[in-house]
Amino acid sequence: MPGTCVIGLQWGDEAKGKLVDLLTPNFDIVCRYQGGSNAGHTVVTGDQVYKLHLIPSGILNPDTMNIIAPGVVLNPGTIIEELEGLKAKGITAENLMISERVHVVFPWHIAEDRALNAKKVKGESIGTTLRGIGPCYRDKVGRSFAVRLADMLREDFPERVASIVEAKNAMLAPIAGEDFEPLDAAAITAEFSGYAETLRPFVADTTNYLLDAVDESKSILFEGAQGSLLDIDHGTFPFVTSSNSSGVGISSGSGVPARSINKVVGVIKAYSTRVGGGPFPTEQENEIGQQIRDLGNEYGTTTGRPRRCGWFDAVAVRYTARLSGVSALSLMMMDVVSLLPEVKICVAYELDGQRITHFPSDADDLRRVQPIYETFEGWDTDLTAATSYDEFPDAAKAYINRIGELIGIPVEVASVGPDRAQTIVLAESVSHLAGLA
Ligand code: IMP
């Protein structure tokens, strides 16, 4: 059985969690392979609401193994809180494995994130989630100060912390400002040794587990975090996250060879949002933007920040759909655009007097582009109770078809609300997402 991946094609928050949750029962394994507690999603079943940052969405299904693969950076305190929250609701998470290779987020990473985020890059703060993600990935690549989960279970862990804290205190003092409180190695060792013991039962060699699963033809669902436009190599650098959040990261983060991943579902919202700094060509800093924010409840799951809102950008999504190797689109929040008086799609940009349809690599160029829009008259229909595509007004269908046409990939699913039942599989193409029809 093949590997399938669910990837966000915009700047994150595309409601991937809902799709993963719907697809999970069809898979033996659900795997998170990049990012960390900067991600956040809510899974709703019946009257229960679960807020997860690190634990894969398949945890609620006891028959699905949930894997946190080496490409993730792990805040142990956060995952333990999530485990405790699940336990309080009767979920013991025996179906969870955490790679011994994951890199651990420590207080020095969070202190550094805070210090550096206050500084401007290209005239603007990156506006990170302040979860220590970037500094942890930097230490991973730098190696000298990196600590993997397996290292926390070693006898020499206290010495390792002591030597890192000494160096980090010296590095942080000049950049962290006057109120910097030096890190305390003994306190950190005690706290994190406790975490290590709590997490010990979950620690495993997930890479070999996944390679065996591939040999045994088990089905694996890869759960992407953030969105492809935040990809460290291919996104709107430097206003990106510190991992490969597009499809290119699946293989490096999980250890599963690329040829075993044969289906990538791209998740898009019917409009665009972004949190944090950076260029956003179709942003609507006006009443329309506020209307989208209110109708879509566009406030961050992890940080509570209001999200920046704007029109759907087909130039950006065509780029990320190709980058992530997407073969099907899932269009979320159709209920939100269905209440707007008119709806726009950006079909091209104008840059220095030229019409372009490629996505610029330079953030300054992206700041300068003028979006070229196609405008659709609104259809003013509450779609939240729709149960089939036939119930969609022609204008809504025209909007969806135009998105599929511009991206060059069919829209196979349209979501009209947060509930599982508010998911419409488009009749023409039901075959692709087995189990949703
Ligand atoms: P970091 O990942 O915390 O370093 O933040 C870098 C950029 O990515 C910031 O603009 C964040 O707002 C954004 N970001 C990180 N995680 C998410 C996410 O899960 N959804 C949306 N944006 C995110």
Image (cartoon, grey):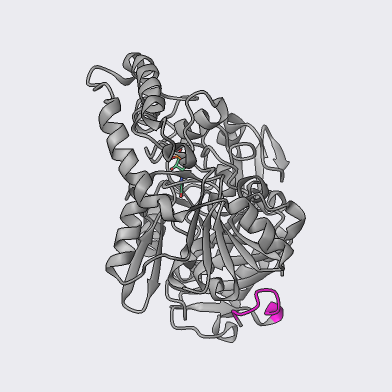
Q: Is residue 366 left or right of residue 109?
A: right
Q: Residue at x 31, y 44 (%)?
A: 194
| Residue 87 placement (x, y as % from top left) | 31, 66
> Which residue is outermost to the front?
155
- Tell me which segment is drawn in magenta: 428-436
| Residue 133 placement (x, y as % from top left) | 45, 38
Residues 398 and 223: in front is: 223
What secondary structure do most residues of the magenta stretch adopt?
loop
Q: Is residue 209 left or right of residue 87?
A: right
| Residue 401 placement (x, y as % from top left) | 67, 70
Q: Residue at x 72, y 68 (%)?
A: 217
Residues 133 and 315: in front is: 133
Q: Is residue 5 left or right of residue 13?
A: right
> How many marks do you count on the picture?
0
Confirm whether residue 294 shows in the render.
Answer: yes
Classify the position of the N terminus by image quarter.
bottom right
Q: Residue at x 35, y 25 (%)?
A: 115
| Residue 412 placement (x, y as % from top left) | 65, 72
Confirm whether residue 341 shows in the render.
Answer: no
| 419 in relation to 259, above or below | below
Residue 329 belongs to magenta span: no
Residues 390 and 423: in front is: 423
Q: Quadrant of residue 5?
A: bottom right
| 210 in relation to 129, above or below | below
Q: Is residue 258 left or right of residue 299?
A: right
Q: Residue at x 49, y 36 (%)?
A: 278
Q: Quadrant of residue 430?
A: bottom right
Classify the position of the C terminus by image quarter.
bottom right
